[in-house]
Image (cartoon, grey):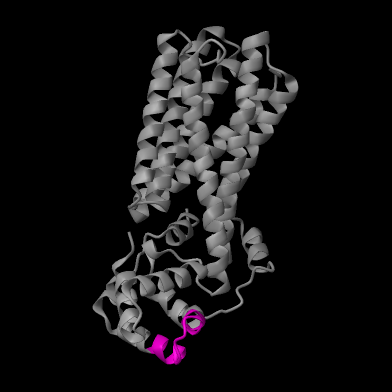
Amino acid sequence: METPLFDLAAKRLEQHTGFSQLEARGTLRIAVKSAGLSAQSLTIEGLRVVFRKLMPGELEQRGVSDSGGTCAAVMADLENAPIAASDSASNNPDDIFRRLAKA
Amino acid sequence: MEDSSYIGGIVVGVGYVVAGSRLLRLSLRTRENPERLLAATFFTWGVSYACWQTPIVLADESLVRPLYTAGRFLTDLGTILSVFFLRLVFRPQSRLAASMVAGITIALILGFAGSGWLGDWEAMYPLENPWWWMEWGAVVVSVAWMCFEGFRHHGMAKLRRQHGLCDGLVCNRYLLWGLTGAVWTIYELAYAIQQIEFNATGSFSGRLDALAAALEFIPIVCIWLVFFPPSRYQRWIDCSDLQPKFAER
């Protein structure tokens, strides 16, 4: 099951690109996977990287003209969303493996 | 078995107990379940080694059945705790992972009880005891799962690292975790051959014994590098060619 942050990001992407829900979620899922992230434990920090580095290329491939501007608009929406502040996913495997090495 | 073969077992057992104790101390500070589960896993496995080695060290045949049975029980208990850890850390929402945990637990309990029912409490006779294979199969699945998660997350962490989302040490820990699972899987295969040979001939081969001892020792080294990495090792990983291409954080 995807995080609420993934659902929100897909919804905003859908609004800003005119993609269908399926296209938006699929495109986001591909970009998230390319960054080595999981839709099940996505954080706002991960999404920043996805929308800055990977999503512009994905959108260009799909015929979106102003891919950079679109990504910036989606990120602006996400940064202002209350869910971005609350969704820290502090128990993802990276955090656990970082913490366990402090034994 | 070689007269001094117990020394390797004692070293590995002490390694697990110390690792478990340090993780237990961490869990008291953090109050988080992953460290509690892993501390209990390592501690249980460490004590199980004491059960396996004591009859050999004391050369007391009368202790073999009770202590080997206790050793098997603790090894199985540690395996159950380890798969709870795997599920909690890597797949907390997965129904498949929950089913695997349940399946492994049931197979271990049935394998243990079934072997006892046939009188093979020490689990030494795989050729005559079909329950032996159920218990062994459950352990193989658990360590292969560990191997799969370690290597899968290492692959993902390498991508995250290129984007500055994962540090090199965490990325390396996944690799070591996968390697530990891989070596344990190979160990289990060697263990099965060893037990079949014992069942057929009544003695252990020296070569297989040495191989099993080596395969038991490697995971302890990996576990120490994962959870208690020496500063020199940390510097070496930090300076490796896997440095992030983008340092944005």
Estimate the x, y position of residue B2 in percent, counting from the top left. Answer: 71, 19
Residue A68 forms part of the magenta stretch: yes
Q: Which residues are magenta?
A: A56-72
In front here: B175 or A98?
Answer: B175
Q: Residue A79 in the image: state x and y as whole percent.
A: 32, 83
- For this rendering, which residue is in front, B248 or B8? B248
Residue that appears at 48% across and 66% down: A33
Q: Say whether residue A57 is visible.
A: yes
Residue shown at 56% from the left, 79% from the top: B247
Q: Using the rendered view, name the quadrant where residue B192 is placed.
A: top right
Of residues B129 and B164, the one drawn nearer to the viewer in this rendering: B129
The answer to whether residue B149 is above or below residue B123 is below
User: Is B192 inside the magenta-drawn segment?
Assistant: no
Q: Is residue A14 left or right of residue A60?
A: left
Residue B224 locus on image (x, y percent):
58, 48
Quadrant position of the N terminus of chain A in the picture: bottom left
Q: How many marks?
A: 0
